[in-house]
């Protein structure tokens, strides 16, 4: 009864409040503390289904893709998501789904992850139980006449004279359909456009050991969820506020005292106006942060309670710390504007196994209720576990609230202690951001929405001394100036670089040619060199598959595939944070009978450190099983590195990769520069 439909010449529009009439939540054993809240899937935010679906030239699989958002809309107005969650796990297999095949997402939005076969008893076998977002219907386990579907393709669909093309649900993977037979637009890992769920509170992490046993409707629109944890029983009761501006939540677990939280839509900047926990905010609010509800315990800032900050650890496993300052303690003077102003050293451990990159934000809630960014780092490789003192890398460094790249040391104004929060986010996917000079706190927090697997925060305190800045220490008497001693680099200053390409590469660092595969194409070998790094380090690689430049074919009439991987001993590795662009592909369309190649010239100075690659797409990671490297690969250290290429491993034959490794504050131990420059070399 809550579902309404309308249409125009192109689309059927489905409107609903996102809540089914059947029960919900009971049976979930892997619960992230979300509960069903109504969503406004109406008007311009309604679901839309093409009335005249168009078969795609190349059907798109959903395995490992479209992990965000819906892939279909059920007959009861409830969206159906990929059977895999946004971490790539099959939700049904890990206990995330209730006995109706659904659960709530980070925005407290209810949706299915498997076909809602129970709707067949409502629609009847002659009608579909859902429509895929490409416009094709999804029927149940049988044809309308009760017969078993025959000749299903890889997408769990087929064409019949009675129904045309349609999908069938199944009781095993892929449960709904295996991909899109029709045309869809993929953007940011989901079908675009589609409605947006509206959260009113921060997303939480799984409550380990909890099993949901009941979900009941109370008076009016109030609801209560009951769960067990061991021998204890817990409840979450909630109801809309009388003015409709938010929700009142009551939490109780075992014999503990009941706690109450009020969540209201947050009015703030940042371009999206994302709602969340009630608090003043003059800028982009924090993204959904996994973790338990903040405790009402004050920090050093007497005017600001801990409810304004993410938890120490969102899951009790992932922890950020520093060897120079404990959580809640005073930041050393050398890390503030009253001292040297260098960034503090950081270490972290316990990141989720699905982590693909990290992002770091240091910010402060000022007296006016606005968040200011002091330290922004992103595209931190997943293999990284620490930052040295004065170093913001590896990774890309954004700008602080003063507009300067790098760490902006706290320099508190006015009396009293001020709290600054350093938060590290473990992300499920790499980011796609432009020039670092345009990446600030707000843009970064907006970009990581929906990608946060876990987070950990380190709260540090700074207080200006009474009377102003710390007095500068008296300088020691200056010695007579002498000529600096010459210091040459040594082998101990170098790092090992291992490279494997299928089939050939040439690699530049900071515009200098560093390594070239000495064996053209066919042999699969590893190039290992000792390399003298200098940061910031811009890496540019030209990689080619063994393909005929006219046909794109390999070994006569075969379509080959590529793959590139490297690892520096300093921790720099290939992964999806790199940029990748194809400049020659073929055979077009995989046509081996009439092979053609499409190529474009390499851009001038593609290897240069100042070349602008901000508009290039990011690389795609591939497993070793897909690339199938030969034996030399296994004889060298590539731990934590990933094979990368463009989106098409087979057809794209000439690819340029680029990345930049930042280490602000790094200075070489040596002060000599040998006259060995061979600049100007180009491929």
Image (cartoon, rainbow, N blue to C red):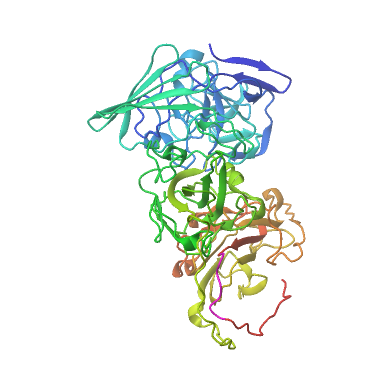
- Residue 267 in view: yes
Where residue 580 appears, x then y in whole percent?
64, 56
Q: Please determine whether, in this image, residue 95 is positioned above or below residue 431.
A: above
Start-end of magenta stretch: 664-670
Q: Left or right of 367: which side holds 609?
A: right
In the image, 7 versus 424, the foreground residue is: 424
Which residue appears farthest toward the front when viewing the image? 467
Residue at x 49% of width, y 57% of height:
624
Residue at x 53% of width, y 32% of height:
177
Where residue 44 appears, x then y in whole percent?
66, 24
Which residue appears farthest toward the left when viewing the image? 231
All told, the count of numbered labels is: 0
Residue 317 painted magenta: no
Q: Please determine whether, in this image, residue 519 is positioned above or below residue 351.
A: below
Q: Please determine whether, in this image, residue 456 is positioned above or below residue 163.
A: below
Main SS type for the magenta part? loop
Where residue 219 appears, x then y in whole percent?
40, 11
Q: Left or right of 195: which side holds 338?
A: left
In the image, 407 versus 574, the foreground residue is: 407
In the image, 217 versus 580, the foreground residue is: 217
Image quadrant occupied by the C terminus: bottom right
Q: Please determine whether, in this image, residue 45 is positioned above or below residue 292.
A: above
- Residue 162 in view: no
Where residue 389 appears, x then y in whole percent?
48, 64
In the image, 82 versus 335, the foreground residue is: 335
Residue at x 60% of width, y 33% of height:
273
């Amino acid at each position: 009864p809550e579902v309404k439909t309308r249409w125009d010449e192109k689309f059927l529009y489905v409107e609903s409040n996102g809540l089914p009439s059947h029960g919900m939540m009971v049976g979930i054993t892997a619960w992230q503390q979300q509960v069903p809240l109504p969503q406004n899937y109406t008007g311009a935010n309604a679901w839309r289904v093409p009335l005249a679906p168009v078969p795609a030239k190349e059907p798109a699989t959903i395995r490992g893709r479209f992990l965000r958002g819906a892939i279909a809309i059920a007959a009861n107005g409830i969206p159906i998501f990929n059977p895999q969650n946004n971490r790539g796990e099959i939700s049904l297999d890990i206990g995330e789904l209730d006995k109706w095949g659904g659960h709530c997402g980070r925005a407290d939005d209810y949706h299915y992850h498997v076909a809602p076969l129970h709707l067949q008893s409502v629609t009847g076998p002659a009608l579909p139980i859902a429509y895929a977002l490409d416009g094709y219907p999804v029927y149940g386990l049988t044809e309308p006449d009760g017969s078993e579907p025959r000749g299903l393709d890889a997408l769990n669909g087929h064409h019949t004279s009675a129904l045309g093309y349609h999908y069938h649900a199944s009781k095993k993977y892929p449960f709904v359909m295996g991909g899109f037979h029709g045309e869809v637009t993929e953007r940011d890992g989901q079908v675009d456009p589609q409605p947006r769920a509206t959260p009113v509170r921060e997303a939480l992490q799984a409550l380990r050991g909890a099993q949901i046993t009941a979900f009941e409707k109370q008076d009016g629109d109030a609801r209560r969820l009951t769960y067990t944890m061991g021998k204890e029983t817990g409840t979450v009761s909630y109801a809309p506020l009388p003015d409709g501006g938010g929700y009142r939540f009551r939490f109780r677990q075992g014999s503990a005292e009941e706690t109450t939280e009020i969540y209201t839509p947050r009015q703030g900047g940042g371009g999206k106006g994302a709602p969340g926990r009630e608090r003043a905010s003059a800028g982009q609010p924090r993204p959904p942060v996994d973790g338990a509800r903040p405790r009402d315990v004050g920090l050093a800032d007497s005017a600001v309670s801990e409810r304004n900050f993410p938890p120490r650890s969102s899951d009790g496993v992932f922890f950020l710390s520093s060897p120079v300052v404990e959580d809640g303690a005073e930041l050393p003077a050398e890390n503030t504007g009253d001292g040297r102003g260098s960034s503090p050293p950081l270490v972290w451990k316990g990141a989720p196994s699905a982590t693909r990159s990290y992002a770091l934000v240091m910010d402060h809630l000022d007296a006016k209720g606005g968040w200011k960014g002091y330290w922004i780092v992103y595209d931190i490789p997943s293999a990284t576990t620490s930052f040295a003192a004065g170093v913001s890398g590896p990774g890309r460094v954004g700008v602080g609230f003063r507009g300067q790249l790098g760490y902006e040391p706290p320099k508190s104004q006015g009396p009293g202690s001020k709290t600054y929060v350093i938060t590290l986010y473990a992300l499920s996917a790499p980011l796609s951001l432009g020039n670092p000079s345009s990446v600030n706190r707000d843009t970064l927090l907006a970009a990581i929405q929906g990608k946060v697997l876990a987070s950990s925060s380190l709260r540090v305190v700074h207080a200006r001394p009474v009377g102003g800045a710390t007095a500068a220490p008296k300088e020691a008497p200056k010695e007579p100036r002498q000529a600096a001693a010459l210091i040459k680099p040594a082998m101990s200053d170098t790092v090992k670089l291992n490279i494997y390409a299928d089939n050939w590469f040439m690699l530049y660092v900071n515009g200098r040619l560093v390594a070239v595969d000495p064996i053209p194409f066919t042999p699969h070998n590893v190039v290992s060199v000792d390399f003298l790094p200098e940061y910031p380090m811009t890496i540019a690689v030209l990689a080619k598959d063994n393909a005929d430049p006219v046909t794109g074919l390999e070994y006569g009439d075969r379509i080959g595939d590529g793959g590139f991987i490297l690892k520096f001993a300093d921790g720099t590795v290939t992964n999806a944070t790199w940029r990748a662009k194809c400049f020659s592909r073929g055979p077009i369309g995989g046509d081996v009978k009439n092979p053609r190649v499409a190529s474009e010239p390499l851009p001038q100075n593609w290897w240069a450190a100042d070349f602008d690659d901000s508009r290039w797409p990011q690389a795609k990671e591939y497993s070793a099983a897909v690339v199938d490297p030969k034996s030399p690969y296994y004889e060298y250290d590539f731990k934590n590195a990933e094979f990368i290429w463009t989106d098409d491993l087979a057809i794209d034959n000439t690819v340029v990769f680029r990345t930049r490794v930042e280490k602000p504050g790094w200075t070489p131990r040596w002060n000599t520069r040998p006259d060995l420059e061979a600049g100007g070399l180009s491929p």
